[in-house]
Image (cartoon, rainbow, N blue to C red):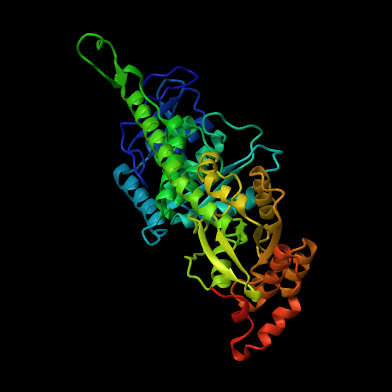
Amino acid sequence: MVGDHREIVIPDLSRWRRGKGRLRGLRCVHSHLKQEPLSQDDLTDLALLRLDLMVALGVDERGLPGRLWMAYLLPQNKEGSIWREESFRSFYELELDFQEFISSLEDELHRDFSALEVDGKEKALLVSVVPRGDPYPIEESLEELKELARSSDLQVIGTIVQRPRELHPRYLMGSGKAKELVIKALQTGADIILFDQNLTPAQVNALAELTDLKVIDRTQLILDIFARRAHTREGKVKVELAQLKYLMPRLVGKGTAMSRLMGGIGGRGPGETKLEVDRRRIKERIHRLERELRELAKGRWQRRSRRRRSSVPILSIVGYTNVGKSTLLNALTDSRVKVEDKLFATLDTSSRRLRFPREREVIITDTVGFIRNLPPDLLDAFRSTLDELQDADLLLHVIDVSSPHFEDQMEAVEELLRELDLGRKPVLRVFNKMDMVDEEFAQRIAARYGGVAVSALRRETLLPLLARAEEILWGTRIVEEVALAGDHRGDRGPERTVLHG
Protein backbone atom coordinates (compact mmCIF):
# COMPACT_ATOMS: atom_id res chain seq x y z
CA MET A 1 0.00 0.00 0.00
CA VAL A 2 1.28 3.46 -0.85
CA GLY A 3 -0.24 6.42 0.98
CA ASP A 4 0.27 10.17 0.85
CA HIS A 5 1.34 12.67 3.51
CA ARG A 6 -2.12 12.49 5.14
CA GLU A 7 -3.20 8.83 5.19
CA ILE A 8 -2.86 5.23 4.08
CA VAL A 9 -6.08 3.56 3.00
CA ILE A 10 -6.34 0.04 4.44
CA PRO A 11 -8.09 -2.35 2.04
CA ASP A 12 -10.88 -4.80 2.86
CA LEU A 13 -9.53 -7.33 5.37
CA SER A 14 -12.59 -9.59 5.56
CA ARG A 15 -10.77 -12.55 3.96
CA TRP A 16 -8.13 -12.52 6.67
CA ARG A 17 -8.29 -14.77 9.70
CA ARG A 18 -10.76 -13.84 12.37
CA GLY A 19 -12.38 -15.67 15.21
CA LYS A 20 -13.31 -15.48 18.86
CA GLY A 21 -10.32 -14.53 20.99
CA ARG A 22 -8.05 -14.28 17.98
CA LEU A 23 -6.11 -11.40 16.52
CA ARG A 24 -6.28 -10.68 12.81
CA GLY A 25 -2.96 -12.26 11.87
CA LEU A 26 -1.78 -8.98 10.27
CA ARG A 27 0.61 -6.27 11.38
CA CYS A 28 0.69 -2.78 9.96
CA VAL A 29 4.12 -1.16 9.54
CA HIS A 30 4.10 2.33 8.04
CA SER A 31 6.34 5.37 7.88
CA HIS A 32 5.98 8.75 9.61
CA LEU A 33 7.95 11.22 7.52
CA LYS A 34 8.29 13.75 10.36
CA GLN A 35 9.18 11.14 13.02
CA GLU A 36 5.91 11.80 14.91
CA PRO A 37 4.57 9.11 17.31
CA LEU A 38 1.55 6.90 16.69
CA SER A 39 -1.60 8.93 16.07
CA GLN A 40 -5.03 8.37 17.56
CA ASP A 41 -6.13 7.05 14.17
CA ASP A 42 -3.33 4.47 14.29
CA LEU A 43 -4.44 3.27 17.72
CA THR A 44 -8.10 3.20 16.67
CA ASP A 45 -7.24 1.05 13.63
CA LEU A 46 -5.21 -1.28 15.88
CA ALA A 47 -8.27 -1.79 18.07
CA LEU A 48 -11.06 -1.90 15.50
CA LEU A 49 -9.18 -4.11 13.05
CA ARG A 50 -7.72 -6.30 15.81
CA LEU A 51 -4.27 -6.09 14.29
CA ASP A 52 -1.37 -8.02 15.81
CA LEU A 53 0.80 -4.93 15.89
CA MET A 54 0.77 -1.29 14.78
CA VAL A 55 4.22 0.16 13.98
CA ALA A 56 5.22 3.67 12.92
CA LEU A 57 8.75 4.00 11.54
CA GLY A 58 10.21 7.50 11.55
CA VAL A 59 12.30 8.77 8.62
CA ASP A 60 15.30 10.96 9.40
CA GLU A 61 16.56 13.90 7.32
CA ARG A 62 18.73 11.58 5.23
CA GLY A 63 15.72 9.39 4.36
CA LEU A 64 16.94 6.51 6.55
CA PRO A 65 15.01 4.64 9.28
CA GLY A 66 14.91 6.71 12.49
CA ARG A 67 12.77 6.42 15.63
CA LEU A 68 10.22 3.63 16.00
CA TRP A 69 6.91 3.39 17.86
CA MET A 70 4.78 0.29 18.23
CA ALA A 71 1.53 -0.64 20.00
CA TYR A 72 -0.31 -3.91 20.65
CA LEU A 73 -3.56 -4.92 22.33
CA LEU A 74 -3.60 -6.15 25.93
CA PRO A 75 -5.51 -8.87 27.77
CA GLN A 76 -7.77 -7.73 30.63
CA ASN A 77 -5.84 -5.88 33.30
CA LYS A 78 -6.47 -3.98 36.57
CA GLU A 79 -5.67 -0.64 34.96
CA GLY A 80 -8.25 -1.20 32.24
CA SER A 81 -5.69 -0.41 29.53
CA ILE A 82 -6.69 -1.39 26.00
CA TRP A 83 -3.20 -1.32 24.48
CA ARG A 84 0.43 -0.73 25.33
CA GLU A 85 2.72 1.65 23.43
CA GLU A 86 6.50 1.29 23.24
CA SER A 87 9.07 3.60 21.61
CA PHE A 88 12.70 3.18 20.53
CA ARG A 89 15.24 5.87 19.77
CA SER A 90 16.34 3.94 16.71
CA PHE A 91 14.83 1.29 14.48
CA TYR A 92 17.99 -0.76 15.06
CA GLU A 93 17.32 -1.04 18.83
CA LEU A 94 14.24 -3.18 18.32
CA GLU A 95 14.86 -6.85 18.98
CA LEU A 96 11.66 -8.86 18.83
CA ASP A 97 10.91 -12.50 18.07
CA PHE A 98 7.54 -11.62 16.63
CA GLN A 99 6.20 -15.15 16.24
CA GLU A 100 6.89 -16.01 19.88
CA PHE A 101 5.58 -12.61 21.09
CA ILE A 102 2.26 -12.83 19.26
CA SER A 103 1.72 -16.49 20.23
CA SER A 104 2.11 -15.68 23.93
CA LEU A 105 -0.20 -12.64 23.58
CA GLU A 106 -2.94 -14.74 21.97
CA ASP A 107 -2.47 -17.41 24.65
CA GLU A 108 -3.08 -14.79 27.35
CA LEU A 109 -6.18 -13.48 25.56
CA HIS A 110 -7.51 -17.02 25.24
CA ARG A 111 -6.75 -17.82 28.90
CA ASP A 112 -8.65 -14.70 29.97
CA PHE A 113 -11.90 -15.58 28.29
CA SER A 114 -11.58 -19.32 28.99
CA ALA A 115 -11.70 -18.40 32.69
CA LEU A 116 -15.11 -16.85 32.02
CA GLU A 117 -16.61 -20.01 30.47
CA VAL A 118 -19.84 -20.88 32.28
CA ASP A 119 -21.72 -24.17 31.86
CA GLY A 120 -21.42 -24.01 28.10
CA LYS A 121 -23.71 -20.97 27.96
CA GLU A 122 -23.21 -18.26 25.38
CA LYS A 123 -21.67 -15.11 26.84
CA ALA A 124 -23.25 -11.72 26.14
CA LEU A 125 -22.09 -8.11 26.39
CA LEU A 126 -24.99 -5.73 27.05
CA VAL A 127 -24.95 -2.33 25.35
CA SER A 128 -27.20 0.69 25.91
CA VAL A 129 -26.85 3.89 23.87
CA VAL A 130 -29.19 6.75 24.80
CA PRO A 131 -28.84 10.39 23.65
CA ARG A 132 -27.85 12.89 26.31
CA GLY A 133 -30.89 14.50 27.92
CA ASP A 134 -33.22 11.60 27.06
CA PRO A 135 -35.11 10.53 30.25
CA TYR A 136 -34.86 6.83 29.30
CA PRO A 137 -34.20 4.82 32.53
CA ILE A 138 -30.93 3.16 31.48
CA GLU A 139 -30.05 1.31 34.70
CA GLU A 140 -33.55 -0.05 35.23
CA SER A 141 -33.84 -1.14 31.60
CA LEU A 142 -30.42 -2.84 31.67
CA GLU A 143 -31.43 -4.79 34.80
CA GLU A 144 -34.50 -5.96 32.94
CA LEU A 145 -32.37 -6.85 29.91
CA LYS A 146 -30.12 -8.95 32.20
CA GLU A 147 -33.19 -10.87 33.37
CA LEU A 148 -34.30 -11.35 29.75
CA ALA A 149 -30.83 -12.65 28.92
CA ARG A 150 -31.01 -15.06 31.86
CA SER A 151 -34.40 -16.27 30.65
CA SER A 152 -32.75 -17.04 27.31
CA ASP A 153 -29.86 -18.92 29.00
CA LEU A 154 -27.27 -16.24 28.23
CA GLN A 155 -24.49 -15.39 30.67
CA VAL A 156 -24.00 -11.62 30.96
CA ILE A 157 -20.28 -10.83 31.27
CA GLY A 158 -20.31 -7.03 31.07
CA THR A 159 -22.15 -3.87 30.11
CA ILE A 160 -21.24 -0.81 28.04
CA VAL A 161 -23.25 2.40 28.33
CA GLN A 162 -22.92 5.60 26.30
CA ARG A 163 -24.85 8.88 26.33
CA PRO A 164 -23.73 10.65 23.11
CA ARG A 165 -24.99 14.03 21.97
CA GLU A 166 -26.55 12.28 18.98
CA LEU A 167 -26.81 8.69 17.79
CA HIS A 168 -24.35 7.45 15.19
CA PRO A 169 -26.33 6.35 12.09
CA ARG A 170 -24.03 3.39 11.37
CA TYR A 171 -23.08 1.98 14.77
CA LEU A 172 -25.56 3.79 17.06
CA MET A 173 -22.55 4.51 19.33
CA GLY A 174 -19.58 6.78 18.69
CA SER A 175 -16.31 5.45 17.25
CA GLY A 176 -14.59 5.61 20.66
CA LYS A 177 -17.22 3.39 22.28
CA ALA A 178 -17.25 1.11 19.25
CA LYS A 179 -13.51 0.63 19.78
CA GLU A 180 -14.09 -0.13 23.47
CA LEU A 181 -16.80 -2.63 22.48
CA VAL A 182 -14.46 -4.47 20.10
CA ILE A 183 -11.68 -4.69 22.69
CA LYS A 184 -13.98 -5.77 25.50
CA ALA A 185 -15.48 -8.46 23.28
CA LEU A 186 -11.96 -9.65 22.40
CA GLN A 187 -10.76 -9.63 26.01
CA THR A 188 -13.79 -11.42 27.48
CA GLY A 189 -14.46 -13.89 24.68
CA ALA A 190 -18.03 -12.66 24.21
CA ASP A 191 -20.26 -14.62 21.83
CA ILE A 192 -23.12 -12.11 21.47
CA ILE A 193 -23.51 -8.34 21.57
CA LEU A 194 -26.96 -7.56 22.98
CA PHE A 195 -28.34 -4.03 22.49
CA ASP A 196 -31.05 -2.63 24.74
CA GLN A 197 -32.25 -0.46 21.86
CA ASN A 198 -33.82 -1.74 18.66
CA LEU A 199 -31.38 -1.69 15.75
CA THR A 200 -31.98 -1.16 12.05
CA PRO A 201 -30.93 -3.98 9.70
CA ALA A 202 -28.02 -1.82 8.45
CA GLN A 203 -26.80 -1.22 12.02
CA VAL A 204 -26.95 -4.94 12.83
CA ASN A 205 -24.86 -5.76 9.74
CA ALA A 206 -22.33 -2.98 10.40
CA LEU A 207 -21.86 -3.96 14.06
CA ALA A 208 -21.60 -7.67 13.22
CA GLU A 209 -18.93 -6.87 10.63
CA LEU A 210 -17.06 -4.67 13.11
CA THR A 211 -17.07 -7.13 16.00
CA ASP A 212 -17.14 -10.47 14.13
CA LEU A 213 -19.88 -11.50 16.57
CA LYS A 214 -23.61 -12.14 16.56
CA VAL A 215 -25.45 -8.86 17.22
CA ILE A 216 -29.06 -8.88 18.42
CA ASP A 217 -31.40 -6.31 19.92
CA ARG A 218 -34.02 -6.37 22.67
CA THR A 219 -36.87 -7.27 20.30
CA GLN A 220 -35.01 -10.25 18.83
CA LEU A 221 -34.19 -11.52 22.33
CA ILE A 222 -37.84 -11.34 23.44
CA LEU A 223 -38.92 -13.15 20.26
CA ASP A 224 -36.36 -15.87 21.03
CA ILE A 225 -37.72 -16.30 24.57
CA PHE A 226 -41.29 -16.53 23.29
CA ALA A 227 -40.24 -19.11 20.68
CA ARG A 228 -38.71 -21.28 23.43
CA ARG A 229 -41.65 -20.98 25.81
CA ALA A 230 -44.63 -21.42 23.46
CA HIS A 231 -46.14 -24.90 23.93
CA THR A 232 -49.66 -24.78 22.47
CA ARG A 233 -50.24 -24.73 18.73
CA GLU A 234 -51.77 -21.27 18.98
CA GLY A 235 -48.81 -19.91 20.93
CA LYS A 236 -46.33 -21.35 18.42
CA VAL A 237 -48.25 -19.87 15.46
CA LYS A 238 -48.33 -16.43 17.10
CA VAL A 239 -44.60 -16.43 17.83
CA GLU A 240 -43.66 -17.60 14.32
CA LEU A 241 -45.91 -14.90 12.86
CA ALA A 242 -44.18 -12.22 14.94
CA GLN A 243 -40.73 -13.55 13.99
CA LEU A 244 -41.53 -13.50 10.28
CA LYS A 245 -42.89 -9.94 10.45
CA TYR A 246 -39.69 -8.93 12.25
CA LEU A 247 -37.53 -10.71 9.65
CA MET A 248 -39.21 -9.30 6.52
CA PRO A 249 -37.62 -5.81 6.48
CA ARG A 250 -34.28 -7.34 7.53
CA LEU A 251 -33.83 -9.39 4.37
CA VAL A 252 -31.04 -7.84 2.35
CA GLY A 253 -29.84 -8.89 -1.07
CA LYS A 254 -27.06 -8.17 -3.51
CA GLY A 255 -28.91 -7.10 -6.62
CA THR A 256 -28.93 -9.08 -9.85
CA ALA A 257 -25.89 -11.06 -8.75
CA MET A 258 -28.34 -13.23 -6.80
CA SER A 259 -30.75 -13.64 -9.72
CA ARG A 260 -32.16 -17.00 -10.70
CA LEU A 261 -32.12 -17.01 -14.48
CA MET A 262 -35.16 -18.30 -16.32
CA GLY A 263 -35.12 -19.69 -19.84
CA GLY A 264 -37.69 -19.62 -22.62
CA ILE A 265 -40.07 -16.98 -23.93
CA GLY A 266 -40.89 -14.39 -21.33
CA GLY A 267 -38.22 -15.79 -19.05
CA ARG A 268 -35.16 -13.96 -20.29
CA GLY A 269 -33.44 -11.32 -18.20
CA PRO A 270 -32.42 -11.25 -14.58
CA GLY A 271 -35.60 -13.03 -13.50
CA GLU A 272 -36.69 -13.33 -9.88
CA THR A 273 -33.87 -12.71 -7.42
CA LYS A 274 -33.27 -15.00 -4.47
CA LEU A 275 -34.19 -12.07 -2.23
CA GLU A 276 -37.57 -11.75 -3.95
CA VAL A 277 -38.13 -15.50 -3.66
CA ASP A 278 -37.35 -15.36 0.07
CA ARG A 279 -39.71 -12.42 0.56
CA ARG A 280 -42.48 -14.08 -1.42
CA ARG A 281 -42.13 -17.29 0.59
CA ILE A 282 -42.24 -15.37 3.86
CA LYS A 283 -45.35 -13.46 2.74
CA GLU A 284 -47.04 -16.74 1.78
CA ARG A 285 -46.11 -18.26 5.13
CA ILE A 286 -47.48 -15.18 6.95
CA HIS A 287 -50.81 -15.51 5.08
CA ARG A 288 -51.03 -19.23 5.98
CA LEU A 289 -50.29 -18.55 9.66
CA GLU A 290 -52.83 -15.71 9.80
CA ARG A 291 -55.44 -18.03 8.29
CA GLU A 292 -54.62 -20.75 10.83
CA LEU A 293 -54.79 -18.20 13.64
CA ARG A 294 -58.27 -17.17 12.54
CA GLU A 295 -59.36 -20.84 12.65
CA LEU A 296 -57.89 -21.27 16.12
CA ALA A 297 -59.60 -18.06 17.22
CA LYS A 298 -63.00 -19.55 16.30
CA GLY A 299 -62.54 -22.32 18.85
CA ARG A 300 -61.50 -19.76 21.47
CA TRP A 301 -64.54 -17.63 20.66
CA GLN A 302 -66.83 -20.65 21.14
CA ARG A 303 -65.27 -21.36 24.54
CA ARG A 304 -65.73 -17.72 25.51
CA SER A 305 -69.38 -17.86 24.42
CA ARG A 306 -70.00 -20.92 26.60
CA ARG A 307 -68.43 -19.12 29.55
CA ARG A 308 -70.65 -16.07 29.03
CA ARG A 309 -73.78 -18.24 28.83
CA SER A 310 -72.87 -19.99 32.08
CA SER A 311 -73.01 -16.56 33.80
CA VAL A 312 -70.03 -17.53 35.97
CA PRO A 313 -67.94 -14.40 36.73
CA ILE A 314 -64.45 -14.29 35.23
CA LEU A 315 -61.37 -13.02 37.05
CA SER A 316 -58.29 -12.38 34.90
CA ILE A 317 -54.83 -12.12 36.42
CA VAL A 318 -52.69 -9.50 34.67
CA GLY A 319 -49.38 -7.89 35.52
CA TYR A 320 -45.76 -7.33 34.62
CA THR A 321 -43.73 -10.39 33.74
CA ASN A 322 -42.28 -12.42 36.65
CA VAL A 323 -44.37 -10.81 39.41
CA GLY A 324 -45.90 -14.12 40.57
CA LYS A 325 -49.14 -14.40 38.55
CA SER A 326 -48.91 -18.16 37.98
CA THR A 327 -47.86 -18.74 41.60
CA LEU A 328 -50.94 -16.81 42.72
CA LEU A 329 -53.17 -18.88 40.41
CA ASN A 330 -51.71 -22.09 41.86
CA ALA A 331 -52.21 -20.88 45.44
CA LEU A 332 -55.82 -19.81 44.83
CA THR A 333 -56.94 -22.93 42.96
CA ASP A 334 -54.55 -25.61 44.24
CA SER A 335 -53.27 -26.05 40.65
CA ARG A 336 -49.87 -26.93 39.26
CA VAL A 337 -49.37 -24.41 36.48
CA LYS A 338 -45.65 -24.26 35.58
CA VAL A 339 -43.81 -21.65 37.65
CA GLU A 340 -40.25 -20.38 37.06
CA ASP A 341 -38.28 -17.42 38.36
CA LYS A 342 -37.78 -16.20 34.79
CA LEU A 343 -39.34 -13.58 32.57
CA PHE A 344 -42.15 -14.87 30.34
CA ALA A 345 -42.35 -18.30 31.98
CA THR A 346 -46.07 -18.26 31.05
CA LEU A 347 -47.14 -17.67 27.45
CA ASP A 348 -50.27 -19.78 27.17
CA THR A 349 -53.48 -18.78 28.94
CA SER A 350 -54.55 -21.06 31.81
CA SER A 351 -58.10 -21.16 33.22
CA ARG A 352 -59.22 -22.70 36.53
CA ARG A 353 -62.31 -22.65 38.72
CA LEU A 354 -62.19 -20.93 42.09
CA ARG A 355 -64.91 -21.63 44.71
CA PHE A 356 -65.87 -18.94 47.22
CA PRO A 357 -67.93 -19.42 50.40
CA ARG A 358 -71.72 -19.50 49.87
CA GLU A 359 -71.07 -21.93 46.98
CA ARG A 360 -70.15 -19.11 44.64
CA GLU A 361 -67.75 -19.89 41.79
CA VAL A 362 -65.63 -17.88 39.38
CA ILE A 363 -63.37 -18.76 36.48
CA ILE A 364 -59.88 -17.38 37.02
CA THR A 365 -57.44 -17.03 34.10
CA ASP A 366 -53.71 -16.41 33.93
CA THR A 367 -52.30 -14.34 31.04
CA VAL A 368 -48.93 -13.60 29.45
CA GLY A 369 -46.87 -11.04 31.37
CA PHE A 370 -46.39 -7.49 30.14
CA ILE A 371 -43.10 -5.67 29.70
CA ARG A 372 -41.98 -2.21 28.65
CA ASN A 373 -41.23 -1.77 24.96
CA LEU A 374 -42.94 -5.04 24.01
CA PRO A 375 -42.27 -5.56 20.27
CA PRO A 376 -45.29 -4.26 18.29
CA ASP A 377 -45.46 -7.40 16.11
CA LEU A 378 -45.50 -9.57 19.22
CA LEU A 379 -48.19 -7.42 20.82
CA ASP A 380 -50.29 -7.74 17.66
CA ALA A 381 -49.81 -11.51 17.62
CA PHE A 382 -50.88 -11.86 21.27
CA ARG A 383 -53.61 -9.22 21.07
CA SER A 384 -56.20 -11.96 20.40
CA THR A 385 -55.17 -13.67 23.66
CA LEU A 386 -55.36 -10.38 25.53
CA ASP A 387 -58.78 -9.76 23.95
CA GLU A 388 -60.08 -12.43 26.33
CA LEU A 389 -59.64 -9.81 29.03
CA GLN A 390 -62.67 -8.06 27.49
CA ASP A 391 -64.87 -10.79 29.05
CA ALA A 392 -63.38 -10.37 32.53
CA ASP A 393 -65.62 -9.09 35.29
CA LEU A 394 -62.58 -8.18 37.40
CA LEU A 395 -58.88 -7.75 36.62
CA LEU A 396 -56.46 -8.76 39.36
CA HIS A 397 -53.41 -6.59 38.66
CA VAL A 398 -50.50 -8.38 40.37
CA ILE A 399 -47.57 -6.14 41.33
CA ASP A 400 -44.19 -7.19 42.75
CA VAL A 401 -43.98 -4.94 45.80
CA SER A 402 -40.39 -6.11 46.44
CA SER A 403 -39.19 -4.60 43.15
CA PRO A 404 -37.62 -1.14 43.48
CA HIS A 405 -39.36 -0.26 40.18
CA PHE A 406 -42.84 -1.55 41.04
CA GLU A 407 -44.48 1.85 40.41
CA ASP A 408 -43.03 2.10 36.89
CA GLN A 409 -44.06 -1.49 36.16
CA MET A 410 -47.55 -0.84 37.49
CA GLU A 411 -47.93 2.22 35.25
CA ALA A 412 -46.58 0.32 32.20
CA VAL A 413 -49.21 -2.41 32.66
CA GLU A 414 -52.07 0.00 33.21
CA GLU A 415 -51.03 2.04 30.18
CA LEU A 416 -51.19 -1.12 28.07
CA LEU A 417 -54.60 -1.95 29.53
CA ARG A 418 -55.79 1.49 28.42
CA GLU A 419 -54.41 0.83 24.92
CA LEU A 420 -56.46 -2.39 24.86
CA ASP A 421 -59.62 -0.39 25.79
CA LEU A 422 -59.74 -2.05 29.21
CA GLY A 423 -59.44 1.17 31.17
CA ARG A 424 -63.06 0.93 32.44
CA LYS A 425 -62.80 -2.61 33.77
CA PRO A 426 -62.81 -3.00 37.57
CA VAL A 427 -59.20 -3.50 38.68
CA LEU A 428 -57.97 -4.78 42.04
CA ARG A 429 -54.27 -4.15 42.63
CA VAL A 430 -52.63 -7.12 44.34
CA PHE A 431 -49.23 -6.29 45.87
CA ASN A 432 -47.50 -9.68 45.86
CA LYS A 433 -44.25 -10.88 47.51
CA MET A 434 -44.92 -9.11 50.81
CA ASP A 435 -42.83 -11.89 52.42
CA MET A 436 -39.75 -10.34 50.73
CA VAL A 437 -40.19 -6.88 52.29
CA ASP A 438 -41.26 -5.42 55.63
CA GLU A 439 -44.93 -6.40 56.06
CA GLU A 440 -45.90 -3.00 57.40
CA PHE A 441 -44.33 -1.36 54.34
CA ALA A 442 -46.31 -3.67 52.00
CA GLN A 443 -49.58 -2.92 53.81
CA ARG A 444 -48.89 0.81 53.66
CA ILE A 445 -48.19 0.67 49.89
CA ALA A 446 -51.34 -1.39 49.31
CA ALA A 447 -53.43 1.10 51.29
CA ARG A 448 -51.97 4.02 49.35
CA TYR A 449 -53.01 2.48 46.01
CA GLY A 450 -56.30 1.00 47.19
CA GLY A 451 -55.13 -2.59 46.85
CA VAL A 452 -54.32 -5.58 49.03
CA ALA A 453 -50.93 -6.96 50.09
CA VAL A 454 -50.39 -10.73 49.80
CA SER A 455 -47.75 -13.40 49.52
CA ALA A 456 -48.69 -16.11 47.03
CA LEU A 457 -46.42 -18.44 49.02
CA ARG A 458 -48.41 -17.91 52.24
CA ARG A 459 -52.00 -18.88 51.58
CA GLU A 460 -53.32 -17.34 54.81
CA THR A 461 -52.48 -13.88 53.41
CA LEU A 462 -54.92 -14.39 50.51
CA LEU A 463 -58.11 -14.06 52.60
CA PRO A 464 -58.35 -10.24 52.31
CA LEU A 465 -57.84 -10.59 48.53
CA LEU A 466 -60.78 -12.98 48.21
CA ALA A 467 -62.93 -10.80 50.45
CA ARG A 468 -62.25 -7.73 48.28
CA ALA A 469 -62.87 -9.73 45.08
CA GLU A 470 -66.22 -10.99 46.37
CA GLU A 471 -67.18 -7.48 47.46
CA ILE A 472 -66.50 -6.14 43.94
CA LEU A 473 -68.21 -9.04 42.13
CA TRP A 474 -71.32 -9.43 44.27
CA GLY A 475 -71.39 -6.25 46.34
CA THR A 476 -71.05 -8.11 49.63
CA ARG A 477 -68.63 -7.71 52.47
CA ILE A 478 -67.69 -11.00 54.14
CA VAL A 479 -64.35 -10.44 55.87
CA GLU A 480 -65.79 -11.54 59.22
CA GLU A 481 -67.50 -14.55 57.63
CA VAL A 482 -64.25 -15.68 56.01
CA ALA A 483 -62.49 -15.58 59.36
CA LEU A 484 -65.32 -17.46 61.11
CA ALA A 485 -65.42 -20.10 58.39
CA GLY A 486 -61.75 -20.78 58.99
CA ASP A 487 -62.26 -21.18 62.74
CA HIS A 488 -64.69 -24.07 62.16
CA ARG A 489 -62.15 -26.07 60.13
CA GLY A 490 -59.79 -26.76 63.00
CA ASP A 491 -56.19 -27.61 62.25
CA ARG A 492 -56.57 -27.50 58.48
CA GLY A 493 -56.71 -23.70 58.63
CA PRO A 494 -59.02 -21.12 57.05
CA GLU A 495 -57.59 -21.39 53.55
CA ARG A 496 -59.23 -24.78 52.93
CA THR A 497 -62.67 -23.21 53.13
CA VAL A 498 -62.02 -20.43 50.69
CA LEU A 499 -59.37 -21.78 48.36
CA HIS A 500 -60.82 -24.81 46.69
CA GLY A 501 -59.64 -26.15 43.32
Identified at 70% across, 63% down, the residue is 473
Residue 47 image point, x, y percent: 46, 38
Q: Is residue 374 left or right of residue 412?
A: left
The residue furthest front is 309
Above or below, 19 against 261 in this view is: below
Quadrant in the picture for the N terminus: top left
Identified at 65% across, 51% down, the residue is 413
Q: Is residue 263 left or right of residue 388?
A: left
Residue 193 visible: no
Residue 244 image point, x, y percent: 42, 37
Above or below, 196 against 400 in this view is: above
Q: Is residue 208 left or right of residue 397?
A: left
Residue 493 image point, x, y percent: 62, 85
Above or below, 458 against 143 in this view is: below
Residue 441 image point, x, y percent: 75, 70
Foreground residue among 145 and 107: 145
Q: Is residue 120 left or right of residue 358?
A: left
Disc tally is 0
Residue 329 visible: yes
Foreground residue among 43 and 450: 450
Identified at 67% across, 70% down, the residue is 466
Foreground residue among 414 and 3: 414
Identified at 62% across, 74% down, the residue is 359
The residue furthest bottom is 490
